Structures are given as structure tokens and as C-alpha cells.
Image (tube, helix red, strand yellow):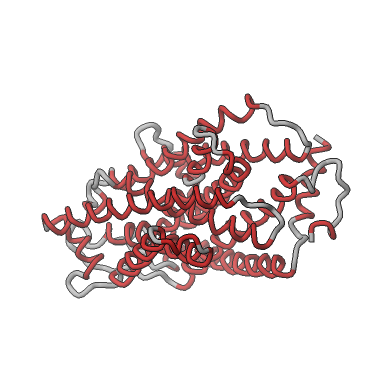
Amino acid sequence: MKEYLRFLVRCFRLSFVGSKTYKLWMLFLTAVALLGLNAWAKQVVGGLATTGMTDQVSWGLYIANFTFLVGMAAAAVMLVIPVYIYRNKELHDLVIFGELLAVAAVVMCLMFIGADLGRPDRALHLLQRFNWPISVLTWDVIVLNGYLALNLHICGYLIWCAYNRRTPGKAFYIPFVFVAIFWAISIHTVTAFLYQGLGGRPFWNSAILAPRFLASAFAAGPAFLVLTLLLIGHYTKYDVPKKAIATLRGIITVALTINMFLLISEVFTEFYTDSSHAASAHYLFHGLHGYNALVPWIWSALVLNSFALVVLYTPVRQRTAWMSAACAAMIVGIWIEKGMGLIVPGFIPTPIGEMLEYVPTTNELLVCGGIWAAGLLLYTILLRVTIPVLSGNLTKDTLYSTKRFS
């Protein structure tokens, strides 16, 4: 126990050590997170009236971000499967970065759910109405917290073993890895079922919603990891194998292709049949009865995803700059598509035909920015601690020196 506390203290001290660029990045994230905390405090006092949500559009930017981040958390499985099932040695040492991303993403998911509740005390009401196994929302609470616990155990055990220069015991983490594979798929599937099960919202009543969720997640998540690995390779001495980037690029290409195909299939069904249930799709893609706030959003997403797909299928994907641009475009495009482009149109028009558009308030945007900053801050700290441990520069036998890690 004493050695473990000493390890935590050393990790805490290490998170404050780094280059000027690292310190400026951490200062920026801290400032944004504090602004978000202040905005959330105003929401606690003023209620959800400080947001742009209404009785007609009761889910907005918070749930949009939650939906996207559940996919980011599930994407860690795209590193785990090649390593532990297909024995891909190039990705072996990089799996932990995906697991750490899952931890940060799930924490952000829980924070967005907390923000959407309006006040912290409403979480008690959620627990009091814990209607398992009937309620899909209850399943969502279980799988999210269970996935967080799994990833904390796997990451913590592997980092602790590396710190002590001890070979990890397979019995202590391999079974949890395979459970996490199925759990990762389940967290996004349950989220999709949460929408599909709402019969009064025809826009979400699609059998391919869950496959679309998984395909988009397995594109955006690895894309974020690619950007992370490129930054790690550029700003640290940690050796990121080029074959690992190539493997992730292949995964991204397949996943994004499937996602675009499923999107085209759904758009064809909505517009070719042109039933009364297609009103939300009409509103999203070209406006309805003069209301068109989301039209620029969805077409921007299609352009960004199409650009990424073109880059991934052409030789320019070998260039770091083009690959980085494709990954960034894909992440933003998928965030729009399965965030604002999925959640808000489900409420417009209402079941009785009302048209009321949703526009996020400044306070709402600040809360979202603060949560993203807090999540990136957590992920940066986890990486800052993990890289020296995996590199062998921080073990229980090394003397701590701030200069050594600057």
C-alpha cells in the first residue's frame, strides 16, 4: 500500500512536468474547464432554462456529445481485437493508449449525463427508479460504469506491472480484456437501442441504427488514436511503429466505408418511400416549412466524411499531413452526423406536428467546452504518466527528477 501511494504521488508530480508547449496546453485546458465549471454552476442555480432545450426538444448538445463519446469509448476494442485475437505485435504496446482513451471518454459521458440532468441531486432520482431489466436507460447506466471499471482495472494493472518491472500475470488481465471486447460493443449497442425503442420518434426507428453507431465509432475512435499517436511520436521520444499507423488506417478505411454505405441506405429509404415518417429527414437535409437550422450542419458532415474517404482511398494517405487532415475531418463529420444530425431531428417535428428548432445557448456551449477540456486534460495526464512508465524511464527503482522528464 505504501509503495502504491508513492507511485500515485510520483505520477501526480510528473503531470506538472513537461516542455513549454505541454504546460501551455495544460493551462489552456484548465482555463476552459474552469469556464465550463462556472457555466455549469449557473445552470445548477438557474435550471435547464439556461440551455436551448425545451419541452419539444428535450435532448440537445449534451446528449449529442454523449452519443458521440460512447462510440469513442467503444473504439478501444479496435486495438484490442488485432492484438489479443489476431496477435498483431505492432499494436501490442499501443493497446493501453486506446484503453486510456476509453477511460477518459466514459468519464466525459458520465459528465454529459450529469449536465443533462440539470442538477446533481437528480441522479438520486435516477437510482431510485432503477427499473432493471425493463428500462434500456438502466442497461445504459450499468454497461457504462461496468466498462469504466474494466478499463481502469486493465490499464491500472498493466501500468503498475510496468512500473515494478514485473511481467503481468495473464490470469489477472487477459479474461478482463476479452470481457471488455464484448462490453465495448454492448455499450454502443445499448445506446442505439435507447433511441430505437422510442416508438414516438420515427426518425430513430431504424434497424440499422445500431450498426451505423458501431461503424461510425470504429472510424472516429481509431482516427482520434492516430492523431494521438502522431502527436506522441512528434513531441516525445516514444517510438510509434509505422505499421501500427498503417493497421489503424486500414481499420478506419473499412469502418468509414461501411458507415457511409449505411447512411446512403438510410437516406434512400427515407426519401424514396417519402412516407409521413420522413418529415425529420426532410427537415435535416433540406429544411421543412421554412425551418432549416440543421441543413448546413449535415451537409458539412457529408463533405468532411467524403473528403476523408477520398484521402483514405488515394496514395496521399501515406503522407502524415493528409492523413492527419482526413482523421480530423472524419472526427468532426461523424460528431455532427451522430450528434446534432441525429439527436435534434428526432424531435422535429413533434408527434403532434409542432415545429420548434433548437439553438444551443452560450452557457450550454461553455459547459460542453468545459467537459471536453476536462476529458482531454484527464487523457493528457494519463498519457504523460504512462509513456515514461512504458518506456522504462519511470520505475520504482528510478530516482524521481523533474529534469529527466522535461
Horizontal side of 296 relative to 80 (left or right) equals: left
Of residue 48 and residue 85, the one placed in the foreground of this image is: 85
Horizontal side of 202 relative to 360 (left or right) equals: left
Percent x, y of residue 358: 33, 68
Residue at horizontal 83%, vertical 57%?
404
Horizontal side of 186 relative to 207 (left or right) equals: right
Residue at horizontal 44%, vertical 58%?
65
Of residue 161 and residue 15, the one placed in the foreground of this image is: 161
Residue 106 visible in the picture: yes
Residue 121 visible in the picture: no
In the rendered image, which quarter contains the C terminus? Answer: bottom right
Which residue, as the protein is rendered here, is positioned at the far front? 315
In the rendered image, which quarter contains the N terminus? Answer: top right
Of residue 242 and residue 341, the one placed in the foreground of this image is: 242
Which residue, as the protein is rendered here, is positioned at the far right? 399
Percent x, y of residue 60: 38, 61
Task: Report how many numbered discs are placed on residues in the image.
Answer: 0
Q: Vertical placement of 187 versus 327: above or below?
A: above
Which residue, as the protein is rendered here, is positioned at the far top? 171
Horizontal side of 325 relative to 172 (left or right) equals: left
Of residue 341 and residue 39, the one placed in the foreground of this image is: 341
Percent x, y of residue 333: 39, 63
Residue 164 is drawn in which quadrant?
A: top right
Residue 30 is drawn in which quadrant?
A: bottom right
